[in-house]
Amino acid sequence: MAPKVLISDKLSPAAVQIFKDRGVEADFLPDVGKDKEKLREIIGQYDGLAIRSATKVTEKIIAAADNLKVVGRAGIGVDNVDIPKATARGIIVMNTPFGNAITTAEHAISMMMAVARQIPAADASTQAGKWEKSRFMGREITGKTLGLIGCGNIGSIVAERGIGLKMKVIAFDPFLTPERALALGVEKVELDGLLSRSDFITLHTPLTDKTRNTIDAAAIAQMRDGAYLINCARGGLADEQAVRDALDSGKLAGAAFDVFVDEPAKENVLFGAPTFVSTPHLGASTEEAQENVALQVAEQMCDYLLSGAVRNALNMPSITAEEAPKLAPFVRLAEQLGSFAGQLTETGIERVRLEYAGAVADMNVQALTSAALTGLLTPLLQTVNMVSAPILAKERGMQIEEVRRDKQGAYETYIRLTVETERQSRSVAGTVFADGKPRIIQVKGINMEAELGEHMLYITNEDKPGFIGHLGMELGNNEVNIATFNLGRTAPGEEAICLVEVDAPVSKEVMARLETVSHVKQVKPLRF
Ligand SMILES: NC(=O)c1ccc[n+]([C@@H]2O[C@H](COP(=O)([O-])OP(=O)(O)OC[C@H]3O[C@@H](n4cnc5c(N)ncnc54)[C@H](O)[C@@H]3O)[C@@H](O)[C@H]2O)c1
Ligand SMILES: O=C(O)[C@H](O)COP(=O)(O)O
């Protein structure tokens, strides 16, 4: 059945066409995102949800999203998505980090120009027939200092444009390297220096607990008298009341905001200040940007839903469309190894170690580790997948270790998973054969070569004559048909492990009888 996607915000129709062309069913309901109840009612039908900023993907929506696999944000900011909750439910959240960056940078520059020359107020006055030529004295920007708080995708483009406008550009961004600053032609400064030196300050950081109220009353006090503040990033980066006070007192000559703490902002403390310019979150609203982000998000969502390729996800390692098919058998193997260990582990897991040897070490091991953890946690938890597994493992205090190494031993490539609990350490290793099928090649250091079927019996025993006959007899007497049988031992007469594939689940009664077979130490059913 074709995957089904809901578009719940005003995305460019280009997205609908992409979904259609790629065989994904898409319902374009651009107003449903604003109707929380309706969204909650219908979200259960969909595999994908394509949004902008109006749809709030809250805990409640996620709880009702029984089939949802991916949320695609046609744009950058994902603060309208509860990513931890989505992750815990195994839903990928992806965005389009570059598609609207130029447009938003242009909006920030437009806002700077608009506020420096009071264009909105001058326009309103002129069209009201007032011709107030002496009321609107502006500020020239050439030679002025432009201070950027945040110099990532959008900040960098604003920097380039600012330099083009003959401004001196300085930037505060703890993650901006000196090399990148040099290449951009900006001076990297600390926040205090930026506040005290800038004529125009523009914000380009995400909204986080750290960046909330970056511009508060104390920061404004450090700014130059008559400075301007521009916010086209996120409401909440500046304390709106403090900005209003600074506009009223004349400390700030002007402020221009595209974003607000509460959106849609039908009223706001900043509204009505004569030197305040505002737009209704229009930063990304150009035809070009909207087409870019809509096309990109639709392609990304189709890639994931149709082939498992992951791009620009915020809660899952990337898997390219090219590597997805090559990775698939190793994902299956890693999941089987995890499941094998998970089904045998009865006490709390403290540490998980994944060794990748040979060719698999050059693959996307982050994705393989996620798959192994999925297998490991599935017997213990209700719902877990490659998105949620790493976070669920971390929440349970498991330490995860990844080791990559060159080929060792007889196999070209293999994965070994070792699980440590407070009681013991258990390892299981496997490889993928040329037929693309995973095989278990070692359990607790004992070599064997077993393909895992749906119903397996894991038996530890003493390597003594008669064991196989007795076991076969007991299974046969109880109508259990053996599909495959694999044995391995440490040394003749010593510890042995037996992996038996059977055609149907084995009842508890038969399990109890198998435990009485001579030389058997332990019997466990495994399901794959
Ligand atoms: N108005 C709009 O319509 C619109 C459109 C697109 C993006 N945005 C917003 O613009 C902002 C920037 O987007 P981007 O694509 O450039 O993001 P980005 O991730 O590329 O850049 C953000 C930068 O902020 C820096 N940063 C993080 N914490 C910081 C801190 N405490 N102090 C200083 N710098 C810090 C990061 O190092 C990074 O370089 C985001 O908030 C995004 O949501 C708004
Ligand atoms: O983060 C973004 O991409 C912008 O805030 C744009 O939001 P929008 O898609 O709702 O215009």
Image (tube, rainbow, N blue to C red):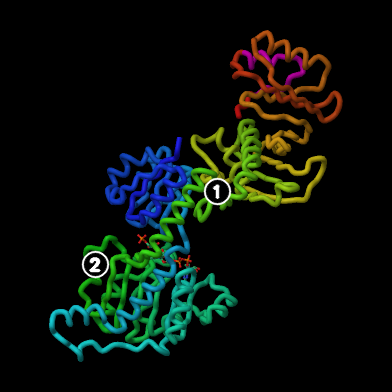
Q: Secondary structure at mark 2?
A: loop
Q: Within the displayed image, which quadrant is ligand 2 positioned in?
A: bottom left
Which residues fall within the magenta stretch?
A: 510-524
> Toward which corner of the image does residue 289 lie, by quadrant?
bottom left
Assign a secondary structure to mark 1: loop
Residue 309 is tagged as 1
Q: Is residue 469 magenta?
A: no
Say above or below: 487 vs 70: above
Image side of residue 210 versus residue 425, left or right: left
**What residue is shown with label 2?**
268
Q: Nearer the viewer, residue 400 or 40?
A: 40
Residue at horizontal 31 percent and vertical 83 percent from the top: 116
For mark 1, does the 10 Å Cα neighbourhood hold few (<14), some (14 to 19), or many (20 or more) residues? some
The answer as to whether callout 1 falls within 8 Å of ligand 2 is no
Relative placement, left or right, of 455 versus 414 is left
Q: Tell me the quarter of the image containing the C terminus.
A: top right
Q: Nearer the viewer, residue 212 or 330?
A: 330
Residue at point 82%, 42% (across, down)? 409
Q: CA distance from mark 2 to mark 1?
A: 43 Å
Pick out the residue farthest to the bottom: 134
Q: Is residue 243 left or right of residue 505?
A: left
